[in-house]
Image (spheres, rainbow, N blue to C red):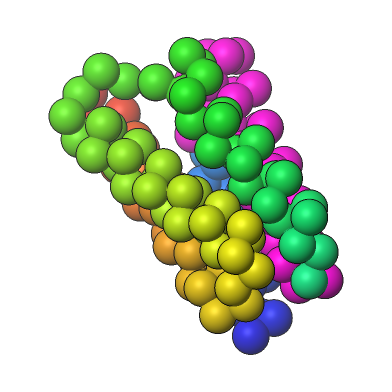
Amino acid sequence: MTRTWWYLVTLGAAATISVNAMQGPQVASVMREKLGHTQKILEAMVTSDWVALETQSRVLEELTNDRRWFVLNSPEYARHSTSFKQAVHDLHAAAVTRDLDEAPKAYAAMTLQCVDCHRYLARARLAK
């Protein structure tokens, strides 16, 4: 299980860094914040620190409403963003209810949404 988590974190970090290199400073800063919160979320989850998990997932949920979050004005980006926001919401709900079964599933879904969106953004840039 631990190997899978580190794989997901590493994959998410690599995707974040690659997108940041191609975006402006505002996008880079919000993606760095996102990465920091996701790392703290993983730490809280594996140490069963429910207070930190709840706090960090709530802060990440709030970050998705930051104006810097809206990188592109396209239906595809909006779909990815909505899916990520839902995964973060599910994670926060699992943290609030202290659901040890659902929290890791929501974290994995959230991470996969990150990777899917970053892959989409990279393809969109290549197409240009």
Residue 50, above or below 5: above
In x, y percent, where is residue 56? 70, 45
Q: Is residue 110 visible?
A: no
Q: Camera-side residue: 22 or 101?
A: 101
- Residue at image point 57% right, 29% down: 63
Query: In the current view of this chain or complex, which residue is farthest to the left?
Result: 75
Magenta stretch bounds: 19-47
Q: Is residue 83 visible?
A: yes
Q: Camera-side residue: 52 or 119?
A: 52
Q: Main secondary structure of the magenta part?
A: helix
Quadrant position of the C terminus in the picture: top left
Residue 10 magenta-drawn? no
User: Image quadrant of residue 31?
Assistant: top right
Q: How many marks?
A: 0
Residue 35 magenta-drawn? yes
In x, y percent, where is residue 16? 55, 41
Residue 48, above or below 36: below
Query: In the current view of this chain or complex, which residue is farthest to the front?
Result: 97
10 left or right, relative to 52: left
Q: Camera-side residue: 90 or 104?
A: 90
In x, y percent, where is residue 10? 63, 60
Quadrant position of the N terminus in the picture: bottom right
63 left or right, relative to 83: right
46 left or right, relative to 106: right
Residue 38, above or below 25: below
- Residue at image point 31% right, 20% down: 72
- Residue at image point 47% right, 14% down: 67
In x, y percent, where is residue 124? 26, 32
